[in-house]
Amino acid sequence: MKKLKVAVIHSHVEQSLQAADRLYQLLKQSGHEIDRDNPDIVISIGGDGTLLSAFHLYNHKLDRVRFLGVHTGHLGFYTDWRDYELEELVNSLCNDQEKSVSYPLLDVRIKYRNGKPDKHFLALNESTIKRGSRTMVADVLIKDEMFERFRGDGLSVSTPTGSTAYNKSVGGAVLHPSINAFQLAEIASLNNRVFRTLGSPIVVAQQEWVEIQLQNSTDYLVTIDQFNIQQDEIKSVEYKIAEERIHFASYRHMHFWHRVRDAFIGEV
Ligand code: NAD
């Protein structure tokens, strides 16, 4: 029987706290070790937001860690297990054959005007850029070539697994997560006789990169998944597919399009 090092990250709603207690008991009984520092498996209990938090806690160990999500609310996109299936989950850990599926991540580099060093992040869902008070004006460059001048509320850049999150709400396409690409979607662009953008989301290939050059201002808001990056004199933000990928323990497989149908359409 396999013994694994396991970390458990849970939300603080009652159902998640109870599920976490039960999981700790089952893990102990079956001889697995709780190790928050160097886990083989990170189990999140809660919703997609909890899995996003777990990802950001362990995003410097992505080559060693596999993730697994238990949902205690409605079906999530990163959460395959229900809280009443914990026995089955721990049995799967005991029979672990180190199988995993991996998905692309977004590499985000923020550059500043005031000589501050660049900041580098990985996003699992998306990164957005918005402007606090006025219309955001930004030049969009693809592979260092000017593509368009954007005017509007902002831009969203998402991974394939993030395509069903914020990206979908702003009219982006849902991408199958086996596609190694990222998507740029507009948030309420201004389009008239003077201002013109493409007006539709674009899917950018793995070898390509996108740079968003911002006009001089200090009221931009950049998000990385659930985090807001502090406002500052941001000059530009660069996006590409990251070299790192997120790995999920694959003990069971849910067809991606079934999940999309279950989450957004329901019974047909
Ligand atoms: P949260 O956990 O409350 O998540 C908000 C909702 O987004 C939840 O219903 C969650 O299940 C869903 N979600 C998250 N990732 C998803 C994915 N990959 N596919 C489909 N649905 C997904 O809030 P949070 O902890 O702040 O999570 C941050 C995420 O919430 C962001 O990355 C963003 O994608 C999403 N969000 C969406 C909107 C919107 O659609 N208008 C607005 C804000 C945030």
Image: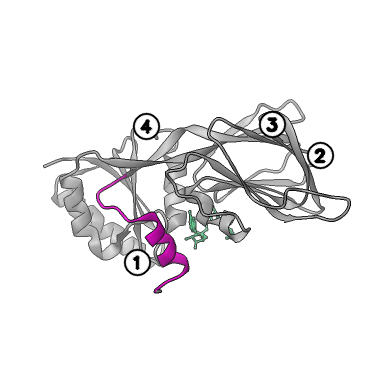
Q: Which residue is mark 3?
A: 111
Q: Which residue is mark 1?
A: 15
> Which is more N-terminal, label 4 or label 3?
4
Residue 210 in which image quadrant: top right
Q: Which residue is mark 2?
A: 215
**CB at mark 4 closer than 8 A to ligand 1?**
no
Q: Amino acid at mark 2?
A: Gln
Residue 138 in which image quadrant: top right
* In magenta stretch: residue 130: no
Mark 3: give few (<14), some (14-19) or many (20+) Cα within 10 Å: some
Q: Amino acid at mark 1?
A: Gln
Residue 168 in which image quadrant: bottom right
Q: Kindly identify which numbered label has been placed on residue 63.
A: 4
Q: Nearer the viewer, mark 2 or mark 1?
A: 2
**CB at mark 3 closer than 8 A to ligand 1?**
no
Instruction: Count the marks.
Output: 4
Residue 182, image x, y percentages: 55, 42
Residue at 25% across / 56% down in the picture?
A: 23
Image height check: is 145 above or below 167? above
Q: Secondary structure at mark 2?
A: loop
The span picked out in magenta is 249-267
